[in-house]
């Protein structure tokens, strides 16, 4: 009992600088989860579809980018070309998968995204190979010492990137005509179409934006881990973030990431020994589940109102 | 490119790909199943393993017409490193060929665990070369499971011997701290009992740090190790993306790479290259050499690659994992050759190949003849000893290649590891109601 209820707090108060280091490391790790969660949110927000393929899109974007760089393209050109590939992919998904399924229940569209996921996993590796590829785009990696606290420059860069991304997406959704149309489609497909909003174009746009967000996540995770199949598994880290932050909230994805990231790191370091260690993977889900008990729509999600 | 397209498409869509090594003849080939993972999260490690295994048999077919004139028919089945699919592959392949599967090489501790009882009932040997259950070295309890040339327990023991050498002797280990970062699975937990016993024997502190699969996030582990515990040495039992992530995180908290030693599954090019310059100085255990400058590779180039039949690109021949699977193929081939001397030059059954494995004796002279001088230490198996007494070395990554930094290390088997193997195997036998074989006769 003491190992669970007393020792962790003694540790925290005995080593405040170390606690701060773990907390900051967790917050910044959470931002990396948020980068992946943002892609899920975008598509769910605009189409009510839970995109199972978001992890596969992150891998596909990273594989394409590193493949083009390996072929000799400069980094900037490879990024532009990869964005073009992701937009083309969005158009293909709209034409081949989504268009025939307009007005089908959300579960049908969800099942379709599982198919997209398997296709992208195989297609990306067929084109670019399954070997691990090193992605080097100049992100600083050496640690930074602030007093006694060690902070990763790479993670700071990731946090900055996520901040800029969220700001751009918030402006896009709130201040542009396309953004308003996206929100209208999210509320009701048929009503949006009846007032002249082109559903197909909106879907292409939102999948393209999700593809670009996947590219950003792919660059960050690919630089951290190397570009390899395991990147698709980062989607598992994004799920508790989504549950906690809400499936329809962009700020929720960020705040959810911060809470999950810091929560799991602090739990692993200070409470892990009492529970046998390696608790951070399930701890995120448990934390999200606790939030669900009090706010089923997540911290920032839209309240679910079903009229019967 | 076409080969990649075909292999990846088949592997992804069907979960299975089949490649015949050399010319598969309709009449009387020796069938050798190859459980691979060219797909899935561990594909970067599985691909060079699959290639090394395929190329050696292809070379034997091209150079010698197989073994003793019996052509070798090798068929791959993609497990994606998944236990369920491993069992499915086993069931699909075990009865193929005129005499069924000669031997299975699962390349996964989990699949090995899942197959032990099935393979024993089917009388097909499992060669878990450098993975699987360490206590399966006791051939009296595990008649169809082989752990040659060394187990994880032997690896852990050899690592501590190496550390003692670096510290100035076993006496200097007292008061030191050794941490183990391990994949939180049956595989990762294998060395813990050995290291605990060694900690007690040599009076060092032993700390464990489990990492949840797949090991994408290790920040909390490494903050604790690098910023708080600061152990004298860190050992790692990792696999796949966990390895390179650990190396990067260790570097990020300033842990010295030359005091960080991985098990042999954490010591391939795929583990260090993604970590870039951070990995320079990192060490790992191994039971074989790296590089493509050995006579056996010359034959592979001449008889396979020069004919455009190689499984991979020429420059990837000689990678650590390629060499490991190639040596695995050598051990299987030599077991078949040994058994043919008794049972005749014809396709053999699993039971007959089991006899060949138990009577395999790779002397230094034989190793030299096979073109493996410097790649492998001598091994000799028996009915009771399915490990074979292999020796181990420590290698270090210099940013471009692996080089040995220790001589061959003899694990402390007599009176220590062997006693542990037998104790654990006896417990397994009691749980399963197995009557151990009498190997005295």
Image (cartoon, rainbow, N blue to C red):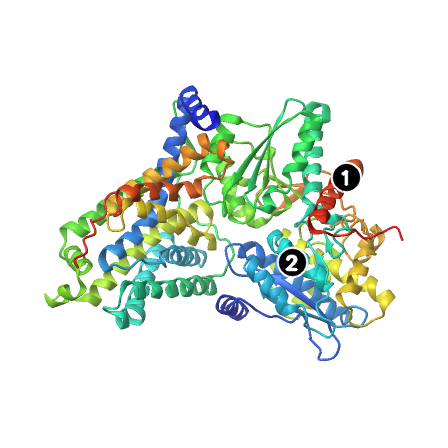
- Report whether residue B79 is seen: no
The residue indicated by pointer 2 is B115
Residue at image position (30%, 41%) is: A291
Quick check: B174 above or below A307? above
Q: Tell which residue pokes out farthest to the bottom in this image.
A: B26
In the rendered view, does A131 fall on the left or right side of B395? left
CB contact under 8 Å: marks 2 and 1? no
In the rendered view, does B105 fall on the left or right side of A137? right
Q: Tell which residue pokes out farthest to the top in this image.
A: A14
In the rendered view, does A225 fall on the left or right side of B345? left
x and y, in percent, of residue B391 in the image: 75, 44
Q: Which mark is residue A56?
A: none
x and y, in percent, of residue B1 in the image: 52, 68
Whole-angstrom CA distance, mark 2 to mark 1, is 25 Å
Q: Which of B90 and B183 is in front in this view?
A: B90
Quick check: B278 above or below B306? above
Q: Pointer 1 indicates a residue of which chain?
A: B
x and y, in percent, of residue B89 in the image: 60, 65
Q: Tell which residue pokes out farthest to the left in this image.
A: A195
> Between disc 2 and disc 1, whose residue precedes?
2
Choose top left, top right, bottom left or bottom right for residue B60: bottom right
Category of crowding for the residue at label 1, using alpha-carbon neighbours closer than 10 angstroms: few (below 14), some (14–19), many (at least 20): some
- Report whether residue B12 is seen: yes
The residue indicated by pointer 1 is B419
């Amino acid at each position: 009992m003491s190992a669970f209820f007393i020792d962790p707090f003694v540790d925290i108060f005995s080593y405040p600088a170390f606690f701060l280091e773990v907390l900051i490391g967790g917050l910044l790790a959470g931002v990396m989860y948020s980068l992946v969660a943002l892609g899920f949110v975008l598509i769910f927000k605009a189409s009510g579809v839970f995109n199972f393929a978001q992890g596969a899109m992150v891998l596909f974007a990273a594989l394409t980018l590193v493949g083009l760089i390996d072929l000799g393209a400069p980094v900037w050109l490879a990024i532009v070309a990869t964005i073009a590939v992701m937009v083309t992919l969005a158009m293909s998904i709209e034409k081949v998968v989504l268009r025939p399924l307009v007005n089908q229940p959300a579960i049908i569209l969800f099942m379709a995204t599982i198919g997209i996921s398997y296709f992208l996993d195989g297609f990306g590796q067929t084109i670019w190979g399954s070997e691990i590829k090193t992605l080097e785009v100049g992100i600083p990696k050496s640690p930074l010492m602030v007093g006694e606290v060690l902070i990763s420059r790479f993670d700071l860069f990731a946090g900055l990137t996520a901040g800029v991304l969220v700001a751009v997406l918030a402006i896009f959704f709130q201040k542009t005509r396309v953004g308003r149309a996206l929100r209208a489609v999210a509320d009701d497909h048929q009503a949006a179409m009846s007032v002249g909003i082109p559903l197909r174009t909106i879907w292409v746009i939102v999948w393209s934006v999700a593809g670009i967000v996947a590219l950003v996540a792919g660059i960050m995770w690919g630089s951290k881990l190397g570009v390899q199949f395991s990147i698709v598994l980062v989607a598992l880290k994004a799920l508790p973030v989504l549950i906690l932050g809400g499936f329809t909230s962009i700020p929720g994805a960020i705040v959810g990431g911060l809470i999950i990231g810091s929560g799991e790191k602090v739990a692993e370091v200070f409470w892990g020994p009492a529970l046998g260690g390696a608790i951070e993977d399930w701890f995120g889900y448990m934390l999200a589940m606790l939030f669900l008990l009090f706010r089923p729509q997540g911290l920032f999600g839209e309240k679910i109102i079903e009229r019967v | 490119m076409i080969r990649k397209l075909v292999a990846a498409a088949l592997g992804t869509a069907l979960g299975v790909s089949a490649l015949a090594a050399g010319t598969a003849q309709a009449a009387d080939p020796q069938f050798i199943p190859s459980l691979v993972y060219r797909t899935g999260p561990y594909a970067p490690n599985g691909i060079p393993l699959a290639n090394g295994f395929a190329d050696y048999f292809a070379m034997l077919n091209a150079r010698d017409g197989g073994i003793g004139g019996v052509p070798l028919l090798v068929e791959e089945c993609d497990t994606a490193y998944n236990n369920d699919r491993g069992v499915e592959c086993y069931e699909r392949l075990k009865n193929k060929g005129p005499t069924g599967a000669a031997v299975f090489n699962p390349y996964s501790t989990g699949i090995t665990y899942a197959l032990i009882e099935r393979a024993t009932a089917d009388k097909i040997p499992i060669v878990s070369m450098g993975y699987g259950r360490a206590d399966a070295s006791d051939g009296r309890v595990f008649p169809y499971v082989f752990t040659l040339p060394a187990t994880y327990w032997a690896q852990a023991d050899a690592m501590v011997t190496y550390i003692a050498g670096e510290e100035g002797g076993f006496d200097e280990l007292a008061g030191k701290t050794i941490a183990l970062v391990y994949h939180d699975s049956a595989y990762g937990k294998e060395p813990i009992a050995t290291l605990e016993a060694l900690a007690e024997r040599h009076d060092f502190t032993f700390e464990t740090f489990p990492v949840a699969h797949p090991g994408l996030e290790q920040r909390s582990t490494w903050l604790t190790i690098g910023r708080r515990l600061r152990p004298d040495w860190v050992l790692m039992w990792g696999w796949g993306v966990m390895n390179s992530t650990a190396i990067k995180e260790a570097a990020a908290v300033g842990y010295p790479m030359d005091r960080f030693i991985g098990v042999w599954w954490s010591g391939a090019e795929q583990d260090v290259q993604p970590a870039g310059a951070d990995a320079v100085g990192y060490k790992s255990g191994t039971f074989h050499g790296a590089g493509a400058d050995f006579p056996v590779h010359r034959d592979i180039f001449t008889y396979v690659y020069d004919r455009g039949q190689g499984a991979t690109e020429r420059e990837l021949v000689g990678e650590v994992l390629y060499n490991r699977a190639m040596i695995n193929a050598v051990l299987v081939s030599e077991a078949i050759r040994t058994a043919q001397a008794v049972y005749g030059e014809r396709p053999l059954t699993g039971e007959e190949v089991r006899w060949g494995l138990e009577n395999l004796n790779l002397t230094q002279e034989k190793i030299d003849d096979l073109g493996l001088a410097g790649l492998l230490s001598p091994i000799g198996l028996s009915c009771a000893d399915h490990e074979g007494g292999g020796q181990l070395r420590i290698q270090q990554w210099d940013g471009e290649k692996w080089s040995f930094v220790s001589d061959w290390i003899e694990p402390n088997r007599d009176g220590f590891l062997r006693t542990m193997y037998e104790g654990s195997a006896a417990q397994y036998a009691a749980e399963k109601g197995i009557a151990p074989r009498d190997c005295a006769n």
